[in-house]
Amino acid sequence: RVYAIPMFAVNKHARLQRKLQTGLISWQTDISSWRENNMSASLSNATSAPMLTSEAVSRVAMALSAAGHAHAPAVLNDSARTAKEAALALGVDLGQIAKSLIFRHEDASSEQALLVITAGDRRVDENKVSALVGRIGRADAEFVRATTGFAIGGVSPVAHCRQPLILFDESLLRFDCIWAAAGHPRVVFRLRPSDLDGLCPQGRWADVAQHP
């Protein structure tokens, strides 16, 4: 049996749907506004932050500018020495933090650094890396600073003192936007995974992470 829907019920339903749609748009707008405000609260004015006068951060800023990168370094209000701290400070997924890890490339004729950039929620599989580049070893703080010009926790993908061998882990490609250190544990810059190709043209993409 087919029942006709009275016109007053149709009109009532239409009015209710418009109210719901208006409320949904308002709610989505409020959420977007909250996210923007939350991000602004997490980041300080980069031009006024004292750590941006450091030589390491200045190198990164100049390298990004020279490459025509759209996003300059920004200063976090909170500590970000680990990927977890950076993700919490920025309000993003842990995987959106691009970790820049330094290893010793022991097969090189001289002591060369190997830079592996991977997602914050992944661990590097050293066996996979060795299969691609040869023997590698762990790097201590002295080696990291001597070869990159950065302290551990602030290693950037760009502006190293000596050109490292570079690998990008494919786990980063899950995201549209990622964040990387810019020479200081509290200074970061925004980029897309594809931007790494232009910022680090010597690098190559590979599967070098342990799978969860």
Image: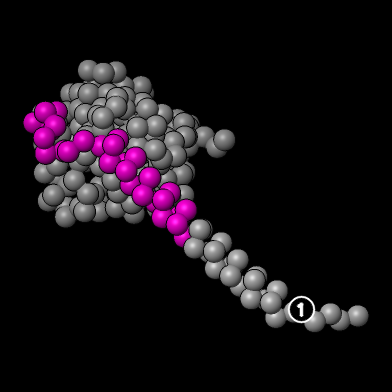
Q: Which residue is drawn at 14% across and 42% down?
A: 61
Q: Which residue is drawn at 59% across and 67% down?
A: 17
Q: Which of 115 and 95 is in front in this view?
A: 95
Q: Which of 66 and 17 is in front in this view?
A: 17
Residue receiving disc 1: 5
Quadrant of residue 155 within the rendered picture: top left
Quadrant of residue 134 within the rendered picture: top left
How crowded is the residue under tag 1: few (<14 C-alpha within 10 Å), some, or many (20+)?
A: few
Q: Position of residue 127 (x, y in %)?
A: 48, 31
Q: Residue at x 54, y 68 (%)?
A: 18
Quadrant for the C terminus in the image: top right
Q: Where is residue 195 in the image (x, y as percent from the top left)?
A: 29, 52
User: From where the camera sits, is residue 211 visible?
Assistant: yes
Q: Nearer the viewer, residue 177 or 41?
A: 41
Q: Give the range drawn in magenta.
A: 25-53
In this view, the residue farthest toward the right is 1
Residue 56 to residue 73: above or below: above
